[in-house]
Amino acid sequence: MTGTYARRRVSTAERFKTWQQDKWAEGYKEGWRIGHKKGFDVGVDNHTMLLNYCALRKFGQRTADDLALLLEGTSSELRKENLIEFAESIIECETPAQLLDRVRRWVEPAA
C-alpha cells in the first residue's frame, strides 16, 4: 500500500510540475504576442505622427487636422500597409485637396 501511494504521490507531483511548466510557457508566449502587437502599434503610430507632421509643414494646420481625423479610425495594419503611399502622397501632391483625396482612397475603400 505504501509503494502504490508513494508512486501516485510522485506521479501527481510530476504532473503538477509539468502543468506549471506548460502554463508558464503559455503565459510567456501570450506575453510575447501582446508585447509584439503593442510595439507594432506604437511604431506605426510614431510613423503616422511623423508623416502627419510633414503634411503640417507642407500644407498647414487645417490639412494636418483633417488627416488626423481621417486616420483616427484606421487600424495599425491598414496604416502600415499605406505608410509609403502616405509619404509619397505628401511629396507628390501639390494641394491639400489632392493629398486628402489620395489618403481618403485607402482609408475609405470603395464598396
Image: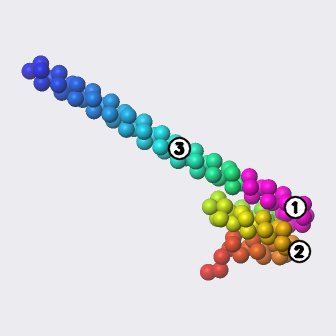
Can the viewer see residue 75 in this picture? no
Q: Are marks 3 and 2 in contact (CB under 8 Å)?
A: no
Give the CA distance from mark 1 to mark 3.
36 Å
Give the CA distance from mark 3 to mark 2.
43 Å
Rendered location of residue 78, percent (x, y): 64, 65
Q: Dot 1 corresponds to which residue?
A: 56
Q: Are marks 1 and 3 in contact (CB under 8 Å)?
A: no
Please report the residue visible at 17 percent of the width from the left and 21 percent of the height from the top: 6
Q: Secondary structure at mark 3?
A: helix
The N terminus, quarter of image: top left
Count of marks placed on residues: 3
Check disc 1 and give the amino acid type: Leu
Q: Looking at the image, which is closer to me, 73 or 83?
A: 83
Name which quarter of the figure residue 68 lies in: bottom right
For residue 32, which numbered disc appears in the image?
Answer: 3
Please report the residue visible at 27 percent of the width from the left and 33 percent of the height from the top: 15
Nearer the N terminus, badge 1 or badge 3?
3
For the record, the magenta segment spans 46-64
Q: Residues within 10 Å of mark 2 (few under 14, many from 20)?
A: few
